[in-house]
């Protein structure tokens, strides 16, 4: 069962896809992720790539993010996200795009800038690295942006990818969560 952990939609159960390909983020991992994101959330524009049922983006909206773009290549997942947005009352603050991550990132105009980018791809395929490289080269992030990548704990995330450096990498059982910030934030 996936539910919203905190905020205005706290406790609401979300529909999920019954599939080996999707793995909703566990509540304890989601709580830890969002405690790290708390300073970035108020009024943030969020991008939830590899969105699955939309649990991470909906959690961000519930905790004060202004808007969220959800992207998943699965039609079934996009339909589930839309249903979960209606259920939680966040439809007016959300946009759902059916596309793979490269298509979604490449479709953004250079004026579209996100404060928080959430990545929860299938594990051990290097997709989070590819996504961060593309996000970095397309510059679809606002100054002070943060990228949070969920990954297998077996996967050691690099210290630097494109314009981003790893600020934190926490382990929660079999799950790792890496937080990346723009190099200028660290050096500036």
Image: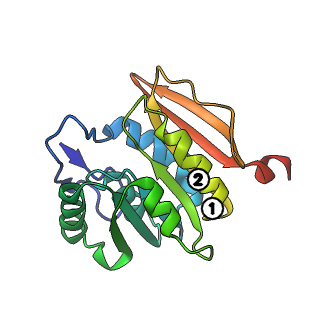
Way the structure is coloured: rainbow
Q: Secondary structure at mark 1?
A: helix
Residue occupying image coordinates x 59% and y 55%: 135
76 relative position to 156: left or right: left
Compared to 114, does 77 lie above or below?
above
Q: Secondary structure at mark 2?
A: helix
Which residue is under mark 1? 138
| Residue 183 screen position, x and y as percent | 77, 48
- Give the number of the disc on residue 70: none
Crowding near pointer 1: few (<14 within 10 Å), some, many (20+)? Answer: some
185 relative position to 142: left or right: right
Residue found farthest to the left: 18
Q: Residue 175 sits in which quadrant? A: top left
The image quadrant where one finds the N terminus is: top left
| Residue 124 screen position, x and y as percent | 43, 28
Residue occupying image coordinates x 72% and y 49%: 163
152 relative position to 18: left or right: right
- Give the number of the disc on residue 134: 2
Compared to 65, does 130 lie above or below?
above
| Residue 125 screen position, x and y as percent | 43, 32
Crowding near pointer 2: few (<14 within 10 Å), some, many (20+)? Answer: some
109 relative position to 13: left or right: right
Q: Residue 169 sits in which quadrant? A: top right
Residue occupying image coordinates x 40% and y 22%: 173
| Picture mark count | 2
The residues bearing labels 1 and 2 have C-alpha atoms spaced at a distance of 6 Å
Residue found farthest to the right: 188
Q: Are marks 1 and 2 in contact (CB under 8 Å)?
A: yes
Compared to 129, does 86 lie above or below?
below
């Amino acid at each position: 069962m996936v539910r919203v952990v905190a905020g205005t939609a706290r406790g609401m159960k979300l529909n999920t896809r019954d599939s080996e390909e999707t793995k909703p983020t566990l509540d304890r991992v989601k709580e830890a992720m969002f405690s790290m994101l708390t300073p970035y959330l108020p009024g943030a524009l969020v991008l939830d790539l590899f969105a699955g049922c939309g649990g991470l983006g909906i959690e961000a909206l519930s905790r004060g993010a202004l808007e969220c773009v959800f992207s998943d290549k699965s039609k079934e997942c996009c339909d589930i996200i839309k249903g979960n947005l209606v259920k939680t009352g966040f439809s007016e603050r959300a946009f759902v795009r059916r596309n793979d991550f490269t298509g979604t990132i490449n479709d953004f105009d250079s004026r579209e800038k996100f404060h928080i980018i959430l990545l929860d791809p299938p594990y051990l395929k290097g997709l989070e690295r590819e996504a961060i490289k593309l996000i970095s080269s397309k510059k679809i992030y606002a100054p002070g942006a943060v990228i949070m990548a969920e990954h297998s704990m077996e996967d050691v995330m690099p210290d630097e990818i494109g314009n981003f450096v790893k600020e934190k990498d926490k382990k929660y059982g079999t799950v790792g969560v890496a937080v990346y910030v723009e190099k200028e934030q660290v050096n500036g």
